[in-house]
Image (cartoon, grey):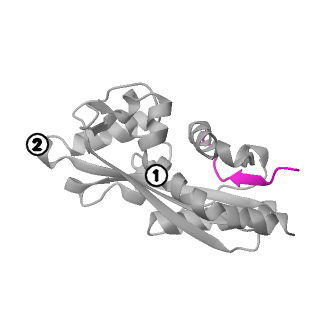
Amino acid sequence: MERVEVVIATRNAGKLREIQAILAPLGLKILSLQDFPVIPEIIEDGQTFEENAVKKAVAVARLTGRIAIADDSGLAVDALQGRPGVFSSRYAGDKGTDAARYQKLLGEMSGIPKEMRGAAFVCAIAVSSPEGRAETVVGQCHGEIAFAPQGSYGFGYAPVFFLPELGKTMAELAPEVKNRISHRAHALEKLKSILPKFIQEKMAE
């Protein structure tokens, strides 16, 4: 039987690997935006992670004629009233690097004591049919902002996101460990419960 093609609406290789590893048991043929170079950048102008995820998933599903999965994720810091939030990827400007973003964050957190450095990674994932029917799930991972970056795994704010119960930052965790506990892992586990009906509908066409 031919495998159903699902497009992950990202060009981020690290994110794609993480999603592929978690969805592997479903036996899908996973594509990404690298397979569709003509699709333009989709502006993430929503007020919430869910709005951005749905906008991307619906647009990519319609443009490719395939089921599309999109996520929007970011870091919500208690002491910063939830910032950087939906602006996590643009926190140091549109051209800012991962290091520039987390160094800016560390600067803003300067002087804030350990007990007030609580934070959560939040991930909203949307799945959309080519006709535009979409559903979303949300996963979270709670921790705190470290005082200095540690670790070389992962991407984004992982080097400064400390997990007290493990005594390590997210960037110090091997991928197989991160893929069990991350915000994206929690959201993807929830996605597994709603994705099959989208696949069944596609197979019935």
Ranked by sequence position, the earlier of labels 2 and 1 is 2
The amino acid at mark 2 is: Pro
Residue plotted at (39% across, 37% down): 158
Residue plotted at (39% across, 40% down): 157
**Residue bearing mark 1:** 186
The amino acid at mark 1 is: His
Q: Disc 2 or disc 1, which is closer to the eye? A: 1
Residue 2 makes an appearance in the image: yes
Residue plotted at (88% across, 50% down): 2
Direction from residue 137 to residue 168 in the image, left or right = left
Estimate the x, y position of residue 65 in percent, counting from the top left: 81, 63
Residue 2 painted magenta: yes
Instruction: Give the label on residue 113, or none.
Output: 2
Quadrant position of the C terminus in the picture: bottom right
Residue plotted at (24% across, 61% down): 81
**Picture layout, residue 180 above or below residue 173:** below
- Front residue (pair 30, 100): 30
**Kind of element beneath mark 2:** loop
Residue 96 makes an appearance in the image: no
**Magenta span of residues:** 1-12
